Amino acid sequence: CIKNSGRTKRERIFIMDGYSLGYANIALVKYWGKKSKDPVLPYNPNISLRLDNLLSKTKIEKSLSNEDEFYINDEKQGPEEVNKMIKFISKFTPVDREKICIKSYNTVPTAAGLSSSSSGTMALVLACNEYFKLNKSTQEMVEIAKEGSGSSCRSFYKLAAWLEDGSVEELSCELDFSMMVLVVNEDRKKISSRVAMEQCVQTSTTFASWVEKAKKDFVLMKEALKEADFEKIGEITESNALAMHETTTTSSPSFTFLTEESHRAMDIVKQLRSQGYRCYFTMDAGPNVKVLYLKEDQDKLYEEISKLWNKKIILCME
Ligand code: DP6
């Protein structure tokens, strides 16, 4: 049974075979710092691209034990993960509900800076909507998702902007983008994006200038998307990611998500660009490097990158 909630052509299938599907998204202008935690509001407006091949699928069933259970990729999660998840869903599910078992599968490596929290949270909100028959609209689910993981509110739209007042807008662009991930490491990150961004807010000496830059980048990015100027989009994407990562090295204690291999991947992208390939990089709360390019260039680019990057590459769009 396939149910398509689609109102517009670009909308994805959100429910398939009893599973709710949540998609990862990667920010072109990053969200990095909460101006307010309740409600969750970003310091700067940000923009993302949804990755339709990186997804989580989630199903809720009645628990057969007398406790709430949570599985990720068939692995039973411990009390800390279960409590975190229950605390979140208790905000919008019935108070006197029966115990549930949540089964979630990620095609995205979990917590490796590949946006598994955005796909996982979106899938969880949709699954609760189905199981508890909450009948929420997309807009209401966007609001709920944000409280679970800020960036997940952008996953409901192909191109999304999350604004400082908390609202989420769908953007459009004529270009057919895609991304591939040069996988450096698929392990769980040592520091979560939530903890890391809070440390940067509190201690980074470049946090204020990061916010200023990100606000400007947001305006420039919106213009570039409207003009369908891929070069401009790519340049803003790269410089925005670098400024975000700078806040980690300027925080106290200083840290970085990036490894030598991340830098090697970034160099490959720059090298290919100097040879005329249209490609740009971005990185999130992990060492993996995502490459932004136009879909029409995928085959050529993949062939060239594969010669230089001998580790795993994930193609993020169909
Ligand atoms: C680097 O959305 O994971 O990916 O709201 O605390 O759950 P919480 O943080 P999260 O942070 C995402 C940070 C980022 C940049 C981005 O996606 O914009």
Image (tube, grey):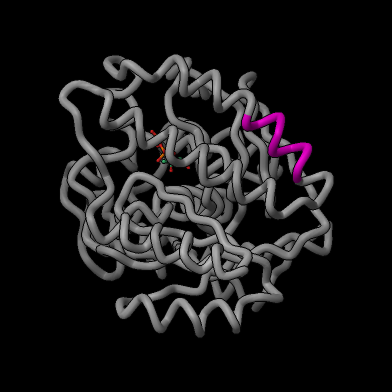
The reply to whether the magenta stretch includes residue 219 is: yes
Residue 215 in picture, x, y percent from top left: 61, 23
Dominant secondary structure of the magenta stretch?
helix
* 101 and 44: which is toward the camera: 44
Point 63% across, 65% down: residue: 278
The reply to whether the magenta stretch includes residue 213 is: no
Q: Is residue 92 visible?
A: no
Position of the C terminus, as image quadrant, is bottom right
Position of residue 281 relative to residue 297, above or below, is above
**Which corner quadrant of the image does residue 21 belong to?**
bottom right
Position of the N terminus, as image quadrant, is bottom right
Position of residue 261 relative to residue 28, above or below, is below
Point 44% across, 14% down: residue: 208
Looking at the rendering, the stretch of residues picked out in magenta corresponds to 217-224
- Relative side of 247 to 122, left or right: left
Point 27% across, 16% down: residue: 203
Point 49% across, 81% down: residue: 304
Residue 207 in picture, x, y percent from top left: 39, 19
Quarter of the displayed picture in which ligand 1 can be seen: top left
Residue that sits furthest to the front in the current view: 274
**Which corner quadrant of the image does residue 317 belong to?**
bottom right
